[in-house]
């Protein structure tokens, strides 16, 4: 920044060599097109909006112009995923997040509920419909099932990288999900 700029002297921490990678984050076709036109890597927020995601990634690749930031189209996808030892356990754990998102999207946010609270919640018809869309944009199950679904999702979108977000009521089940997925993908 110039000497007289008010932000002169402010630095990101931790400091590292060179400049940080610049990515365009988006959940739809407009941000994908912007990323392509600007020659930036594109990080698609699938966990927010899976609708039209394949079309957005294709539009990004078609509109991509190499730049000083990125020489070829590069796609990362943020995906809500949860793995557990059994399918039933994974669905039970996911119920907390699902109820929390339903309430958030209907303008009635609540503290993050336990699985027991979520499973006992009396969903309205409208909430059940919304719940279906929330479940459809999440990958939940045993680690091998989640791995297969994630790999298929990455292949369909031409994504080089997946960023997994796992939200659970308790830290231990979140950590266990990440551990199961790391083991399943052979990540040490």
Image (cartoon, grey):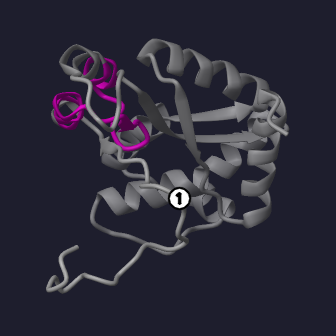
| Quarter of the image with the C terminus in it | top right
User: Which residue is nearer to you in this view: 69 or 117?
Assistant: 69
User: Which residue is nearer to you in this view: 84 or 7?
Assistant: 7
Who's the residue at 22% across and 28% down the image?
A: 36
Magenta span: 31-57
The verdict on residue 40 being magenta is yes
x, y percentage for residue 42? 34, 34
Neighbourhood count class around disc 1 (C-alpha, 10 Å): few under 14, some 14–19, many 20 upward = few
Q: Which residue is mark 1?
A: 17
x, y percentage for residue 173? 77, 56
Who's the residue at 72% across and 66% down the image?
A: 170
| Above or below: residue 175 compared with residue 141 | below
| Quarter of the image with the N terminus in it | bottom left
| Above or below: residue 170 compared with residue 136 | below
Name which quarter of the figure residue 50 lies in: top left
The verdict on residue 32 being magenta is yes
Q: What SS does tag 1 mark? A: loop
User: Which residue is nearer to you in this view: 40 or 16?
Assistant: 16
């Amino acid at each position: 920044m110039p000497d007289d700029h008010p932000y002169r002297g402010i630095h990101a921490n931790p400091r590292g060599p060179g400049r940080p990678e610049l990515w365009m984050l988006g959940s739809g076709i407009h941000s994908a097109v912007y990323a392509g036109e600007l020659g930036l890597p594109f990080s698609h927020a699938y966990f927010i909006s899976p609708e039209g995601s394949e079309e957005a990634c294709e539009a990004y690749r078609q509109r991509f112009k190499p730049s000083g930031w990125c020489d070829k189209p590069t796609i990362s996808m943020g995906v809500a995923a949860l793995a557990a030892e059994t399918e039933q356990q994974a669905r039970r754990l996911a119920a907390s997040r699902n109820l929390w998102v339903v309430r958030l999207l209907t303008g009635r946010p609540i503290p993050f509920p336990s699985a027991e609270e979520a499973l006992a919640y009396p969903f309205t018809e409208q909430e059940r419909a919304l719940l279906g869309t929330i479940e459809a944009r999440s990958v939940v199950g045993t680690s091998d099932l989640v791995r297969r679904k994630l790999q298929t999702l990455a292949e369909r979108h031409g994504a080089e990288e997946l960023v997994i977000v796992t939200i659970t009521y308790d830290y231990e089940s979140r950590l266990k999900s990440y551990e199961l997925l790391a083991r399943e993908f052979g990540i040490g």
